[in-house]
Amino acid sequence: MRQVVLDTETTGLSTAQGHRIIEIGCIELVNRRITGREFHRFVNPERDIDEGAVAVHGISREDLEHEPRFCDIAEEFLDFIRDAELIIHNAEFDVGFLEHELTLMAHERPKITDHAMVLDTLALAREIHPGQRNSLDALCKRYEVDASARHVHGALIDSELLALVYLAMTGGQSSLLLDEESNGGTAGSRQAAGGEGTMDPATTRDLNLVVIRASEAEIAAHDAMLEKIRKSGACVWDID
């Protein structure tokens, strides 16, 4: 599963007022692991930047005079995000600006969803933490993600922080496996010892669990994948 954590910085808050993108930062995740592949570009907006925006990200128009325009880096950007799931905090804002830029350059496919799926972590955080502050800063504090190196907002550093927040917020089994590896134990040993992860049988006795069985097509696809893995070497879970 390929995901791209994305953030932008802009000249202001509204495309209706002619504001433009000045920075794009992307971090690649594959199977919930940060791969080290990044897409990071500063962009010449060919217009002034609001003072309030400069106070947030610290980027002036003079800083961008010799940077490429969005139309110059658009295809490289779209190639990077193609067929991935975009992880964006307050996706409506960033997607709106990206689509505005693509529309201005008369791109034949200006809709971001024509190139990638979109997951809004702000909406996800509001579901998980209703009634609480769910800004990126608040989530960093809640999930103990170190944001001390960030003195101003920047597209790449905010993408890096969001990647860590997203992985923590959606940890599930991945977090459990990481805990097992770091502690040198197993989930079963922690449960037996009454540690984290222990479930009281009284809380599960009356659960109405739904079992969804795999279809014949899904089983066939699973068997085909196992066969590919067997050809590459022994499967540790498949030894007689």
Image (cartoon, rainbow, N blue to C red):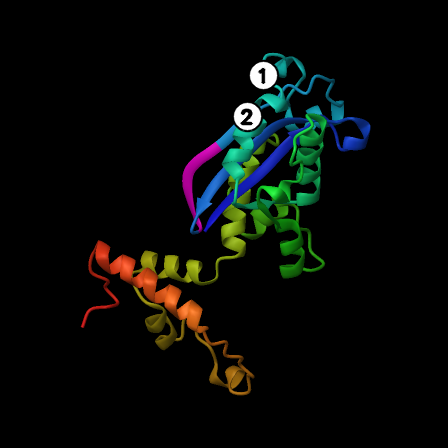
Q: Amino acid at mark 2?
A: Arg
Q: Residue at x 58, y 16 (%)?
A: 67
Residue 178 x %, y %: 38, 57
* Label ID, residue 41: 2
Say if 72 sits above or below 193 in the image: above
Residue 57 x %, y %: 64, 27
Residue closer to the observer: 69 or 221: 221
Q: Is residue 37 magenta?
A: yes
Judge left or right: residue 202 versus residue 16. left
Residue 186 seen in the current view: yes
Say if 200 sits above or below 125 in the image: below
Residue 105 x %, y %: 68, 25
* Label ID, residue 67: 1
The part of the image, by quadrant, that contains residue 124 is bottom right
- Asked whether the residues under the numbered discs 2 and 1 touch, taking CB atoms below 8 Å apart as contact, a structural biologist would say yes
Q: Amino acid at mark 1?
A: Glu
Q: Residue at x 43, y 68 (%)?
A: 218
Spatial CA distance of label 2 from label 1 is 9 Å
Residue closer to the observer: 126 or 208: 208
The part of the image, by quadrant, that contains residue 174 is bottom left
